[in-house]
Image (cartoon, grey):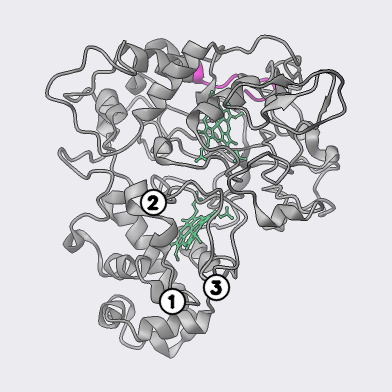
Amino acid sequence: MRKTVFRAVACVAITLSLAACGNGSGDASAPNTTSGATTGSTSSSDASKLSLAAQAGQKLFFDSNLSGNKNMACATCHVPAYAYGPPNSLSVQLGSDPTQSGARAVPSLRYKDATPPYNDVAANPDNVTSNAPGGGFMWDGRAATLADQVAMPLLNPVEMNSSKAAVVQAVQNASYVDLFKQAFGADVFSNPDAAFADVGKAIEAYEHEDTSFHPYTSKYDLYVHNKIGGTLTAAETRGLLIFNSGTIGNCSACHYAGANFDGNQGLMTDFTYQAIGLPRNDTSIPNNPSPIAANQDPTYYDMGLCGPLRTDHQPGTAGIATPDPYCGMFKVPTLRNVATRGAFFHNGVLHSLVQVVHFYNTRDTNPEYWYPATGGTGAPIANPSYALFPQYAPGATVQKFNDLPAAFQGNVDEELPMGTGDGGSNTLGSGTQPRAQGSTPIMTEHDMQDLICFLNILSDGYKPPATQPTSGTCVN
Ligand code: HEC
Ligand code: HEC
């Protein structure tokens, strides 16, 4: 919740009928959930239904000749069978030049078409929370449109590592060049800059038009729209309540479950930016499976909205307060298909949903699980198996929020379930009061199991079983 305003979560939590919240348009705004539609692994729907631009975009999306070493397509990192997210649990992916690797986790490309443009004072889809940074593409919103976004991976030396000229040349040599000309004009290649921009427009059209990018075929969708097979189990229902509860999980305060701007239900994001103080993904974490190479430089900090990749909110910029309130803020991602992921958050530092929910629950109460610590006396005590740090010495000083310089650590959100949510607003975040180290976390182990059961039903491609199970995980 923001400063004086409460987020509209209670509506969802109390009624449990999502259609009764939001814009009240109910099923009239239901997305096109064609029955028996895609499985999670379908790469595309019927191409003949796509515009010519989108058909060209589909070819481009899967074309590895667009990359510097002709070995990497958009679909290499954004794999259809993984909800257009990464196919492995690496925190960040290798580039077309395999000696290079990215500095951020690959997001899913599903349900991005509802994203509004970036704005420092964006309206919140819950219609209650006060305006705040929101919208835009990439973890820091620096791409204004899906078409503009396309140039970024193509030209990034640690990703596809190509050039405008080489991309346009690759399209001219491609088997689908005639399709591209049909879509953008026979003389499209007479202006290479315009042709490069058309590559972006083609891929944007594909992402917008192809239903595999927004299938709405999860168990949750069946449930929300009262479709056959959309009956939640007892565990999933409890998980949904915890997700929406403003006093327990509070997930929907940011991963908004109500109607979004386009009327679709439950994209599980309000498109805002928050600093949640993640651990730095570096070699200080014992047995870290994939530390980020850029973090070997102790002076490098990926601070989201305030840079370094985004350049218009950097500390010292005219009109930006001191200390810069944007530092550490990253976009709230959709949680649809989150169970298909093997690396979580912008820096991919966590590798399972069990870790994620425990991080939210114990970031403040047990920071020794998540951040490096120095000093301390006495025999080390073992941390739980989900913790990033296997043990700590009693009395040690924990370097909380170690992926943000100290000057900006006040930006970190103390909303529930992480902090107490009390104390008004810290700059652009909410709540200033952390939960005391050693105090009791808000969710029980049972709550978190149920919450994960709920997150599991957000995956597309759900096929209702012939008979509902009466026992097993996530049932009772
Ligand atoms: C090497 C892996 C890789 C490749 C190849 C790649 N991407 Fe990405 N993609 C990423 C990463 C990492 C991000 C997040 C970048 C950031 O926030 O700075 C991202 C972000 C995006 C986003 C923004 C999603 C959001 O949540 O706002 C879109 C859209 C996207 N990519 C589309 C594409 C397209 C189209 C291509 C091909 C032209 C492509 N990507 C190629 C890794 C990749
Ligand atoms: C204060 C706002 C806020 C609240 C409350 C919140 N989240 Fe998040 N969530 C975020 C932001 C912001 C990110 C991205 C942060 C980053 O990567 O730096 C995120 C990321 C995630 C991710 C990683 C997704 C991905 O694609 O990598 C998961 C999973 C997640 N949240 C689950 C939850 C659950 C479950 C709850 C409730 C227990 C919750 N969140 C509560 C803001 C919030």
Residue that badge 3 annotates: 161
Dot 2 falls on a residue whose secondary structure is loop
Instruction: Inspect the image, locate mark 2, and give the three-letter code of the amino acid beneath it.
Output: Tyr
Residue that badge 2 annotates: 84
The answer to whether 387 is drawn above or below residue 183 in the figure is above
The answer to whether 162 is drawn above or below residue 257 in the figure is below
The local crowd at label 3, few if under 14, some if 14 to 19, many if 20 or more residues have their Cα within 10 Å, is many
Q: What distance separates the C-alpha of mark 1 from that of mark 3? A: 10 Å
331 and 448: which is toward the camera: 448
Q: Position of residue 214 (x, y in %)?
A: 32, 45
**Residue depicted at 59% across the width and 68% down the height:** 99
Q: What distance separates the C-alpha of mark 2 from that of mark 3? A: 20 Å
Q: Position of residue 453 (x, y in %)?
A: 38, 22
Name the quadrant containing residue 364: top right
Instruction: Inspect the image, locate mark 3, and give the three-letter code of the amino acid beneath it.
Output: Asn
Chain-order first, disc 1 or disc 3: 1
Q: Position of residue 161 (x, y in %)?
A: 55, 73
Instruction: Residue 235: say if magenta.
Output: no
- Report whether 191 appears left or right of 224: right
In which quadrant will I find the N terminus?
top right
Chain-order first, disc 1 or disc 2: 1
Q: Which residues are magenta?
A: 1-9
Q: Would you say the beta carbon of the disc 2 residue lies within 8 angstroms of ligand 1?
A: no
Question: Magenta part mainly helix, strand or loop?
Answer: loop
Residue that badge 1 annotates: 70
The local crowd at label 2, few if under 14, some if 14 to 19, many if 20 or more residues have their Cα within 10 Å, is many
Q: Would you say the beta carbon of the disc 1 residue lies within 8 angstroms of ligand 1?
A: no
